[in-house]
Amino acid sequence: MSVIKALRLIGLRRGLRILVQIARASVRYVALGLRPNMDTETNNQPARFGDVLGHGPGGVPAYSSHYPSADKQEFPDRNSYRSYVDGVFMGYKWQCVELARRWLYQTRGYIFDDIAMAYDIFQLRAVRVVRDNKLLPLRSFRNGALRPPEPGCLLIWNEGGTFEITGHVAIVTEVLEDRIRIIEQNVEHEVWEEGCDFARELPLRRTEAGGYRVECTLDETEILGWVIQTDDDTHAEPIIEVDRRLFNLRTAFVAERGCAQQPWLDPRQPDEAAYLAMMGGHRLARDPRDQHRFLCLAETAARELKRATNELHAMFLHATNTVLQDDGLLRRFGIPEELWPRLHRSWDNRRNQMITGRFDFSVSERGIKLYEYNADSASCYMECGKVQGRWAEHFGCDLGRDPGEDLHEWLVDAWGASGVDGILHIMQDDDPEETYHALYMKSAIEAAGLRCKIIRGLADLRWHADGHVVDAEGIEILWVWKTWAWETALQQLRAELDLARRGRTVVRAASPRLADVLLRPEVMVFEPLWTLIPSNKAILPVLSMMYPNHPYLLEAQHEVTDSLRANGYVAKPLAGRSGSNIRIVAPGENVVTATGGRFEHQDLIYQELFPLPRLDGRSAQVCTFSVNGHYAGACVRVDDSSIISAQSDLLPLRIVADADLPRV
C-alpha cells in the first residue's frame, strides 16, 4: 500500500502526525535504552491480524490488531470482530480496551463497564464481579502520585498524539526500580521477543515531591495515571461532586456597535451564498431581537456532553447489533422484511461506516438526557461548524471558545478515511436548506481530496443501457452522500411491494427514483442503510431494555405504561423528522401540545416526559455532532414552543470556563 493511500485511509491530518511521531519515537527508544517492539522501527513485517503477539502473566494472550491483514474469510462481517469470553462481551478485536477487560476477567474475575474511549477508564469508580455482579471499588492515581503503579493495575493515556481521540490503556505486569513493564494491544503488531511476557518497558522515575511518574516513549502522548482495584483511597484522585448548576445554559450579549447592519458572510463562497439566500441576510437567528444574543455553556458541562456523545454512539451501535440479531425486535421498526437481507449485509460490511450524525439533548441542572440520535441525514452542520464562528468573529465575541471550530476538520478526516475511490455524488432535494447543507459538506469532501458532484432533485438521473443509474453526463452513480432520508426511499419500496402483493406487475419507472439509486447493490451510500436502525425511534425502547436507569437515557416503551402515564410522556412516530407529529402528554393524560405532519400513520413509541429547559421564554435544545463515532461539535436550537422543529432558530453557543459563566 502506498504511503498516500495509507494516509487517506486513516485520515491525512492524523496520518502525517503519526509518521512524525514514529520517527521521533525510534530515536527516543534508543536514547532511553528501552526495548522497542514497534514493527515500524524494524524490517519485520507486522503480524497478521489475530496472530498471538505474546502471553502476559497468567497466560492471557495479546493479539495483533493489524487490520489491513485481516482474513475476510475468518472475519467476514462486523459481528466477527466482537470478542466474547464465556458469553461476556470483552470489546472489539483486537483493541486496547478489549485486552484490558479480558485480562481482568480471566485473571481477576471482574470487568469494567463499557466505555466509549480508553481514557474514560480513569473516571470509573467500580468493577463488576461477573460471578455475582458484586461491585468492587476502583481508585485512580494521577501520574506522579505518591502511590506507585503495581502489577495488575491499568495504565491510562489521555487522548492526543499517537492515541489521538481515544486514548489508550495497558496492563502493568511488573514494576522495577527505574521502569515498568506492560502488555497492550493496538499499538504495535510485532511478536514479542522470545522469553518475554511483556510488550514494552516504560521509564519510571521519582519526582521531587516523592511521587512516581511513568514516562511515555511516544512524543505528544500523555499518561493520565493508573487505576487500581483497592479499598484504600490514600493518594487517589478525589471524587468531587460537580455543581449541577454548571449545566444550565446562560444568556449573554455582545455590545451594540452597529455590526448587525453590516455583512459578515462571504457570498463568494458557494455554501455561504446559499445560506444567505435561504436566511434572507447575514444572520444566524431569524428573530431580530437575537442578533446580539448568544448562549454560554460551562466547560464542565461541555466535557460531560462530549463524554455522553461518545458513550451514546457506542451504545446505539450495541443496540443496533442486538436488533439485527433478533427478528422480533427488528419487526418493531416497520422496515419491510424484503429489505432485511440488505440491512444485514449493510451492517455486516465492517467498512460501511457512517460519517456523521446528530444527538439532541436536554441539558440543565436536572441532568443531560438524550431525546434521539439523528444518524441518518441530520442537519445544522454548517450552522455549527461555520456560521456561529463567523458570527463571533464579526460581532467581536471573544468569551470562551466556539464549540464548532473543529467540525469541518473532523469531516475532512472522516471523508479521507471513507474509502471512496471514485466520484461521490451528493444527492439532495431541491430545497434551500439542503442546498447550503450539501455545499458545506462538498467543501469538506473536496478538502479530503475526493471528487464529488451535486445532484439536485432526481430529474437529471437516467437509466444506462446496462441497467445502471447515471447522472446527466452519463457517469455511473456508485458512491452517494445524501440529504434525503432513507425513509423516502422506503416509502417508494413499500408502494412497489404493495402492488406486487396485489398481483399487479411492477414496471420499472421511466426515470430512476430515489430507491432505484440508494438500494442498488453496487451503490455505497453515506449514511449507510443500517443507520435506519439507530435513527428509528424504535431503538429507544431497546436502549431502555439494555441500559436500564442509565443516566443519559429516558425511559421509552412501545406502549404507555403506568409509570409513563403517571409522570407524563412524549409520543413520537418511529421514523418522524423535524418535530412532526409529536404529542406531549402531561401526568393525568393531559395533552400539552401536539404538532402535525406527514407521519401520522406511523406506529409510535412513548418516551418519558423530560421538558427542555426554558431560557428567556424559549425552549433550548443542545445538539452535538458525532463524526466517525466521536464528538466533533455542538450548537443550540431554540423555540417558543416546547418542540424543536425545522423552523426553530439557532443561537450562537460559546463554551466558557466555569468561573467565567455569566451570572443569572
Image: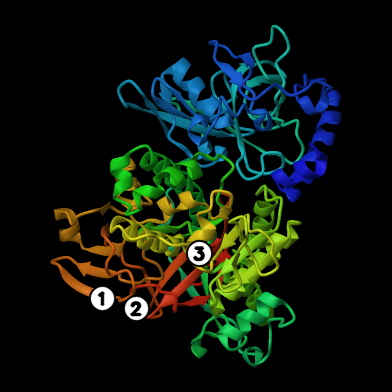
Say which quadrant the C terminus sits in.
Answer: bottom left
Q: Earlier in the sequence, mark 3 or mark 1?
A: 3
Q: Earlier in the sequence, mark 1 or mark 2?
A: 1
Q: Pointer 1: what residue?
A: 593
First in sequence, mark 3 or 2: give its number: 3
Tag 1: amino acid: Thr
Left or right: residue 252 compared with residue 586: right
Q: Nearer the viewer, residue 12 or 282?
A: 12
User: In the image, residue 535 lies at what x, y percent?
Assistant: 42, 56
- Secondary structure, mark 2, is loop
Dot 1 alpha-carbon crowd within 10 angstroms: few under 14, some 14 to 19, many 20 or more:
some
User: Label 3: few (<14), some or many (≥20) within 10 Å?
Assistant: many
- Amino acid type at image mark 3: Leu
Give me the C-alpha separation between circle 1 and circle 2: 9 Å
Residue nearest the observer in this picture, 466 or 538:
466
Look at the image and tell me whether residue 548 can be seen: no
Q: Which residue is denoted by mark 2 in the rendering?
A: 641
Residue sitting nearer the eye, 573 or 309 = 573
What residue appears at the point 38 percent right and 24 percent down from the top-left corner? 87
What residue is drawn where x is 63% and y is 78%? 391
Say which of marks 3 and 2 sits in front. 3
Q: Please tell me whether residue 34 is drawn above or below residue 374 in the rendered image.
A: above
Q: Are marks 1 and 2 in contact (CB under 8 Å)?
A: yes
In this rendering, does residue 43 appear at all? yes
The answer for how far apart the CA atoms under marks 3 and 2 are is 34 Å
Q: How is the image coloured?
A: rainbow
Where is residue 83 shown, x and y percent of the image? 49, 27
* Residue contact between numbered discs 3 and 2, judged by CB atoms under 8 Å: no
Name the secondary structure under disc 1: strand
Q: In the displayed structure, would residue 296 be above or below residue 565?
A: below
Residue with the mark numbered 3: 514
Residue 319 as seen in the image, left or right of residue 295:
left
